[in-house]
Amino acid sequence: MFGFFRKNKQSHVVTGNLSCLGVDMHSHLLPGIDDGSPDVETSIRLIRGMMQNGYRKFITTPHVYPDLYPNTKETILKAHALLNEHLKEAQLDVEIVPAAEYFIDEQFVDLIDQRDQLLPIHQNWILVEISFLAPPQEFSQVLFKLFTEGYQPVLAHPERYSYYHHRKEKYHQLKDQGCLLQVNLLSLLGYYGKNVQEIARYLVKEQLVDLIGSDLHHDRHLEAMAHPSLWAEVNRIMKSGSILNPTL
């Protein structure tokens, strides 16, 4: 489907302009702790490519998902320190902020009560994701708990939850509840399929999108970001003034 992307040994080098975003607030660049970058060398290569694409700051959000990626604040901070050390050696002057993408389940509910263990993407903002198969039964209650504990929930890639595609009112309800919505950059391009693209554009049209994240995992994502139509679309979206990335 993406045969129009450049394929060569330097495919990780992108030349587009996403500097209007400036800050990438959803990425998997910390080495070796989830399904993102497997090692420091890959992390540095991906960061170089993203910087060439106009980004100046990265909020790294490894999965915290006990059944698959049982990360903790400690494992994340350790990987962050390792990456920072190697970035200095590589003479890359860039800000890397350690945060997390939390999977909503019973363990996460317990974690909310341990205030010093959560890693926000900004101030009190907590990035959360839910199952791609079915919504958690007590999703609204978990969001309410986050609010009552003083947190601002940010729902990652709502356009990718297919069970909401025919229930568009759910996106409006989430916003009415006070939840911030973060759309994936590549959803706008159709990387995850036409249906996801249509929903992402619907969310933009309805001005429900607060943040745009790369959700970068690997070179294929970075290569896909090199498409000029994506840069043009993001620049158009940014003119609305509703996207919060530059404020982070």
Image (spheres, rainbow, N blue to C red):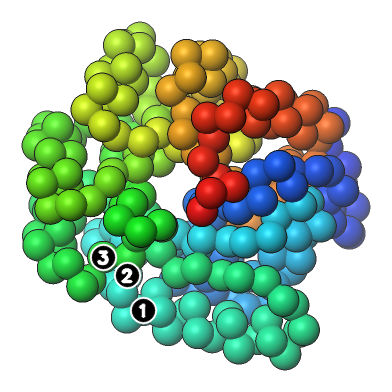
Question: At 40% from the left edge and 41% from the top edge, which residue is drawn?
Answer: 156
- Residue that appears at 59% across and 82% down: 84
Which three-letter amino acid code belongs to the residue tagged 3?
Answer: Leu
Task: Tell me the tag on residue 182.
Answer: none
Secondary structure at badge 2 equals loop
Asked where in the image residue 173 lies, by quadrant, the reply is top left
Closer to us: 188 or 217:
188
Q: Quadrant of residue 182?
A: top left
Three-letter amino acid code at the position of disc 2: Asn
Judging by the rendered image, the residue that carries numbered circle 2 is: 71
Which element type, helix, strand or loop, lies under badge 3?
loop
Q: Nearer the viewer, residue 70 or 176?
A: 176
Kindly identify which residue carries mark 3.
Answer: 118
Circle nearer the N terminus (1, 3): 1
Is 67 positioned to the left or the right of 4 in the image? left
Residue 144 location (% of width, % of height): 12, 39
Q: CA distance from mark 3 to mark 2?
A: 11 Å
